[in-house]
């Protein structure tokens, strides 16, 4: 679903930050992405959902070269990729349920209240559907962000340090939801610094670990 071929990227005219990266993400795969702070993990993820375009090399997403996509093509691609950030943003004046429905509203479709209710149940936020986002805890915010990320039934969820501000129990709950999502033959790409989380995940799901080091993308071994 995502094919990177000898991709390089740098911001502006600066030295490349990421160089000669190749990767194939298949449906049903689960990948972690690690690397030192500032190595380019967020940048790499942004390339995967066409928020940035490569400087050289190719990025093929769902069979299409992202550099050739029109604005509508990019919008269609974004509907196939759900994104969860470390610090998810919501419209604070709108209830949590409406925030989760936002991608449906933005896509111009009708809001499917059954789907919203099922998603609220899935992320265990049923009783918070009518609450405003500022009243949610950190773990609840991340689960609401995950519900919003999957409402358009994406093929891939990209999570950028989603557990960075969570305690261990909340991190495990979020991880379990992502594993459940993955079990429906969907792909997950999960950036984290937390090697303990990766070790815990590897007991539950067959996951590969990618590492950015020295501008390059490496497949980490089993010796985490
Ligand atoms: N929009 C931008 N313009 C210019 N430079 C940027 C931009 N975004 C990030 N950078 C730089 O690119 C480098 C990589 O940043 P990035 O956020 O991708 O790294 P990261 O591995 O995700 O870091 P962390 O683990 O600390 O979140 C950093 O040096 C950062 O300052």
Image (tube, grey):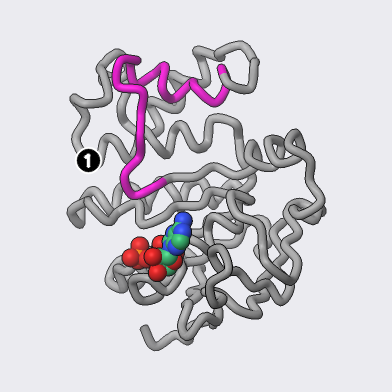
Q: How many marks?
A: 1
Q: Nearer the viewer, residue 195 or 199?
A: 195
Helix, strand or loop at mark 1 = helix
Crowding at mark 1 (Cα within 10 Å: few <14, some 14-19, many 20+):
some
Q: Quadrant of residue 133?
A: top left
* Residue 82 seen by the camera: yes
The region drawn magenta spans 85-105
Q: Nearer the viewer, residue 6 or 151?
A: 6
Pick the quarter of the image with the C terminus.
bottom left
Magenta run includes residue 138: no
Relative to 223, is 78 above or below?
Answer: above
| Residue 167 image point, x, y percent | 18, 53
| Residue 70 image point, x, y percent | 78, 40
User: Left or right: 65 with respect to 172?
Assistant: right
User: Left or right: 144 with respect to 65?
Assistant: left
Q: Quadrant of residue 91?
A: top left
Magenta run includes residue 96: yes
Q: Nearer the viewer, residue 117 or 14?
A: 14
| Residue 192 image point, x, y percent | 36, 64
* Residue 190 seen by the camera: no
| Residue 212 image point, x, y percent | 48, 77
- Residue occupying the point 76% across, 59% down: 60
Relative to 152, is 138 above or below?
Answer: below
- Furthest toward the front, the residue is 13
User: Left or right: 187 with respect to 168?
Assistant: right
Q: Quadrant of residue 161?
A: bottom left
- Residue occupying the point 47% across, 20% down: 116
- Residue occupying the point 51% across, 46% down: 181
- Residue occupying the point 60% across, 44% down: 81
Q: Which residue is identified by label 1? A: 138
User: Left or right: 112 with respect to 200?
Assistant: right
């Amino acid at each position: 679903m995502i094919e990177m071929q000898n991709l390089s990227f740098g911001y502006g005219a600066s030295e490349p930050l990421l160089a000669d990266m190749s990767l194939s993400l298949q449906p049903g795969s689960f990948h972690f992405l690690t690397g030192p702070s500032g190595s380019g993990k967020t940048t790499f993820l942004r390339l995967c959902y066409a928020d940035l375009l490569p400087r050289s090399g190719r990025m093929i997403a769902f069979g299409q070269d992202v550099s050739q996509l029109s604005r509508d093509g990019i919008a269609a691609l974004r509907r196939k990729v759900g994104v969860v950030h470390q610090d998810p943003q919501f419209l604070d004046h709108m209830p949590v349920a409406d925030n989760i429905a936002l991608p449906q509203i933005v896509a111009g479709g009708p809001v499917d209240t059954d789907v919203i209710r099922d998603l609220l149940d899935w992320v265990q936020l049923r009783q918070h559907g009518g609450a405003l986002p500022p009243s949610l805890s950190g773990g609840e915010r991340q689960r609401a962000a995950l519900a919003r990320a999957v409402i358009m039934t994406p093929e891939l969820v990209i999570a950028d340090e989603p557990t960075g501000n969570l305690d261990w129990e909340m991190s495990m709950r979020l991880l379990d939801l992502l594993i459940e999502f993955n079990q429906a033959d969907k792909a997950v790409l999960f950036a984290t610094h937390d090697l303990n989380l990766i070790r815990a995940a590897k007991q539950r799901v067959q996951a590969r670990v990618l590492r950015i080091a020295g501008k390059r993308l490496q497949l980490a071994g089993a010796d985490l």
